[in-house]
Image: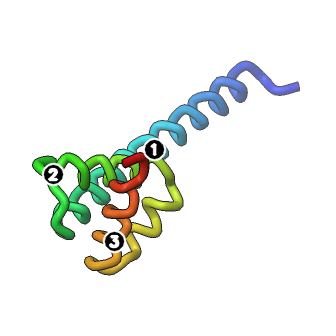
């Protein structure tokens, strides 16, 4: 049977891992925002910035966006900006 000490260590380790995952996700969001700005999107163009927000909502799309060229990033932003309009 696992001791209370071992159980607590496991819970703390899981919490620390969860905190690291959340921090990594926040860093990735900031990277996507910066790459979007570099591609020509900004908060001043509301339609494009909403596209950036939609990209951030899906992990696989964020990875695709990060690994795309400058032109590819803008194409992705424009695609997601056009959804629902």
Residue drawn at x 66%, y 33% as measured from the top left: 10
**x and y percent of residue 31 in the render?**
29, 58
Front residue of 69 and 18 = 69
Q: Which mark is residue 80?
A: none
Residue 24 shows in this picture: no
Residue furthest left in the image: 44
Front residue of 36 and 50 = 50
Q: Disc 3 designates what residue?
A: 75
Residue furthest top in the image: 4
Q: Which mark is residue 20?
A: 1
Snapshot quadrant of residue 23:
top left
Residue drawn at x 63%, y 28% as measured from the top left: 11
**x and y percent of residue 19 in the render?**
46, 37
Image marks 3 and 1: residues in contact by CB distance under 8 Å: no
Tell me the element at label 2.
loop
Q: Is residue 26 left or right of residue 3?
A: left
């Amino acid at each position: 049977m696992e001791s209370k000490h071992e159980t607590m260590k496991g819970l703390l380790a899981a919490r620390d891992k969860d905190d690291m995952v959340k921090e990594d996700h926040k860093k990735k969001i900031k990277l996507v925002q910066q790459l979007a700005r570099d591609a020509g999107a900004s908060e001043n163009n509301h339609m494009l910035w909403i596209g950036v927000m939609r990209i951030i909502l899906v992990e696989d799309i964020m990875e695709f966006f990060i690994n795309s060229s400058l032109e590819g990033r803008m194409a992705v932003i424009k695609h997601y900006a056009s959804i629902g309009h």
